Image (spheres, grey):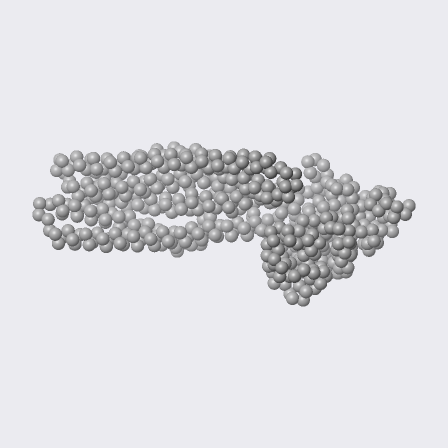
């Protein structure tokens, strides 16, 4: 936050200059009022002198409006720029996260809340409040000194009362802080819940649970609304107490001033100026209180932002993987536990460059988990995974993505053209792009618009788009995790055969829906159970394993010979 402000230090200094000039001009206007009314109430009034004073006052007022306008525009520009820089910096950090960090901390809802709600709170309740607080302090000091210079006794009494009255609403700070934290928390929960409902829309319609989901939505919406109202009501109460004390200060200035007039100590012009000074001082005193409460009330939001920034801390420089001779991935005694159960249990295996592997086994046996760990989607593990001898823990996401690609059954599509979803907004080499399109067998118009979620693109074409992405990326090691699980038999066969034709790639194909006609095309088939590789080898060897043979019997029936 402060780094973003520091980037605009020159503009910030200009605003500070305006904040100093503005109360000086205000003080001159008040002195002008004093002289004008003293002249107008004198026994002999000079019409020309009054006109001259009115012209001078008008010019000072015009100068004040120019200063206020220029200062406001500059402040708005800085606030917008700082807000933009903060969001951009957070997003840059976010996209550099290991996937595990995002899912481990349940921060997806918090990040969404930050970009949609918290950033607006920071603008309204923090950035604007900081500028208001600084402006208020300058106004209080400069106009307070000018008031004392005009009349020491009257100025001292009013300024002293104003300073004491400022302390009263500060008592609300702790309560406001707690209520604003609750609102931010409820807003994060609401955002995450709404995201889940939108993603689960087909399920909602399939089971006709609209009323149940509406009830849950209303409960979450009500909690958010109540927490926001509690915060706003408390803030309004605090601000109104400050306003009441500020008005009373002006009332006292007029009352005491009139008493001094009756005693002949001051003229009526001084009373008018004193009332104006009190009004001008009441505003910064009130804004100081309001802005101080506002800043403190979003302290928890600022802390939350700082924690998210720490979660999204940029990666340290990584080791570079030498890919001249392809990519070999070695799992060394890898163990991944979940709720006390070893999903992957001491697994060791080497996937060699250029070979084709089929991995089969029951759900939950660790097939996907081992490769999700490789792609840093699972944070807690023991053992290691080496990529060409380099520990994957010392490799950044960017470097890892240049060596290993992981495709699963869910294809993430962006709204826009098919070609943009293949290139992912990059500018690949034209020959490489054409080669990827040909090998992935993309048969749809590349300029076709993809709707939200890819609802107008078939499952088979979605898989082909995902395959083309990996080919453009020129990775040597590609994992296909259940990419054909939802496809019809013929399309699944075509995609599996197409993948096996990539002679220069290391292919790991995880599937329950593999084709019996292609099993012999794999260099090795791995059968997994309870987090371990129970058997592996070429089809002609592993078919002798009773567990694997039983699996094939269940899948293909009597087509498998005894």
Q: How many labels, in total?
A: 0
What is the residue that sits farthest to the left in this orientation? 44
Give residue 406's position: percent from left, percent from top: 69, 52
**Rendered view: 218 above or below 472:** above
**Rendered view: 63 above or below 334:** below
Q: Please tell me which residue is depicted at 43% across the width and 38% down the height of the picture.
A: 297
Image quarter of residue 37: top left
Give residue 549's position: percent from left, percent from top: 86, 45
Can you see residue 181?
A: no
Can you see residue 301?
A: yes
What is the residue that sits farthest to the bottom in this orientation? 431
Image quarter of residue 425: bottom right
Would residue 41 appear left or right of 408 to someone viewing this image? left
Name the foreground residue: 528 vs 153: 528
Would residue 486 appear left or right of 239 to someone viewing this image? right
Name the foreground residue: 480 vs 228: 228
Q: Please tell me which residue is depicted at 13% across the width and 54% down the height of the picture.
A: 48
Quadrant location of the C terminus?
A: top right
Name the foreground residue: 540 vs 214: 214
Give residue 519's position: percent from left, percent from top: 82, 52
Q: Please tell me which residue is depicted at 62% across the width and 55% down the height of the picture.
A: 450
Q: Please tell me which residue is depicted at 65% across the width and 66% down the height of the picture.
A: 430
Give residue 18's position: percent from left, percent from top: 32, 52
């Amino acid at each position: 936050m402060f780094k973003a402000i520091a980037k605009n230090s020159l503009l910030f200094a200009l605003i500070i200059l305006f904040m100093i000039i503005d109360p000086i001009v205000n003080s001159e206007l008040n002195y002008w009022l004093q002289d004008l009314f003293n002249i107008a109430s004198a026994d002999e009034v000079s019409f020309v002198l009054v006109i001259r004073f009115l012209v001078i006052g008008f010019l000072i007022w015009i100068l004040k409006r120019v200063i206020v306008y220029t200062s406001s525009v500059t402040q708005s520009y800085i606030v917008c720029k700082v807000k933009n820089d903060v969001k951009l910096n957070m997003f840059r950090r976010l996209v550099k996260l290991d996937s595990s960090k995002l899912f481990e901390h349940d921060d997806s809802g918090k990040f969404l809340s930050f970009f949609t709600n918290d950033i607006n709170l920071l603008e309204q309740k923090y950035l604007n409040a900081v500028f208001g607080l600084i402006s208020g302090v300058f106004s209080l000091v400069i106009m307070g000194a000018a008031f004392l210079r005009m009349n020491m006794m009257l100025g001292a009494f009013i300024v002293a009362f104003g300073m004491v009255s400022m302390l009263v609403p500060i008592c609300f700070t702790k309560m406001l802080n707690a209520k604003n934290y609750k609102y931010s928390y409820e807003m994060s929960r609401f955002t995450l819940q709404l995201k889940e409902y939108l993603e689960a829309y087909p399920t909602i319609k399939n089971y006709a649970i609209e009323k149940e989901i509406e009830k849950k939505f209303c409960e979450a919406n009500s909690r958010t609304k109540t927490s926001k109202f509690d915060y706003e009501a408390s803030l309004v109460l605090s601000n109104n107490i400050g306003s009441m004390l500020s008005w009373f200060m002006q009332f006292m200035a007029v009352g005491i001033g009139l008493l001094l007039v009756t005693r002949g100590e001051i003229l009526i012009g001084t009373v008018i100026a004193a009332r104006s000074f009190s009004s001008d001082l009441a505003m910064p005193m009130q804004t100081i209180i309001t802005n101080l409460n506002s800043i403190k009330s979003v302290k928890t939001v600022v802390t939350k932002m700082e924690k998210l920034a720490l979660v999204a801390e940029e990666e340290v420089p990584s080791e570079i993987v030498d890919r001249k001779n392809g990519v070999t991935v070695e799992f060394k005694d890898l163990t991944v536990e979940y709720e006390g159960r070893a999903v992957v249990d001491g697994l060791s295996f080497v996937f060699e460059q250029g070979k084709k592997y089929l991995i089969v086994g029951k759900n939950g046996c660790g097939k996907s988990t081992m490769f999700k760990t490789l792609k840093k989607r699972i944070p807690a593990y023991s053992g290691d995974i080496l990529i060409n001898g380099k520990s994957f823990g010392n490799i950044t996401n960017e470097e890892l993505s240049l060596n290993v690609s992981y495709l699963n059954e869910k294809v993430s599509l962006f709204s826009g053209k098919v070609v943009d979803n293949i290139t992912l907004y990059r500018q690949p080499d034209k020959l490489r792009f054409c080669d990827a399109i040909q090998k992935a067998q993309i048969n749809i118009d590349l300029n076709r618009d993809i709707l939200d979620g890819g609802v107008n693109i078939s499952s088979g074409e979605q898989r082909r788009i995902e395959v083309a992405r990996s080919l453009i990326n020129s990775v040597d090691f590609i994992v296909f995790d259940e990419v054909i699980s939802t496809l019809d038999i013929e399309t699944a066969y075509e995609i599996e055969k197409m993948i096996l034709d990539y002679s220069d790639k290391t292919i790991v194909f995880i599937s329950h829906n593999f084709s019996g006609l292609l099993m012999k095309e794999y260099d090795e088939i791995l059968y997994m159970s309870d987090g371990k590789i129970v058997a592996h080898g070429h089809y002609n060897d592993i078919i002798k394993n009773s567990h694997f043979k039983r699996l094939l019997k269940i899948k293909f029936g009597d087509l498998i010979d005894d």
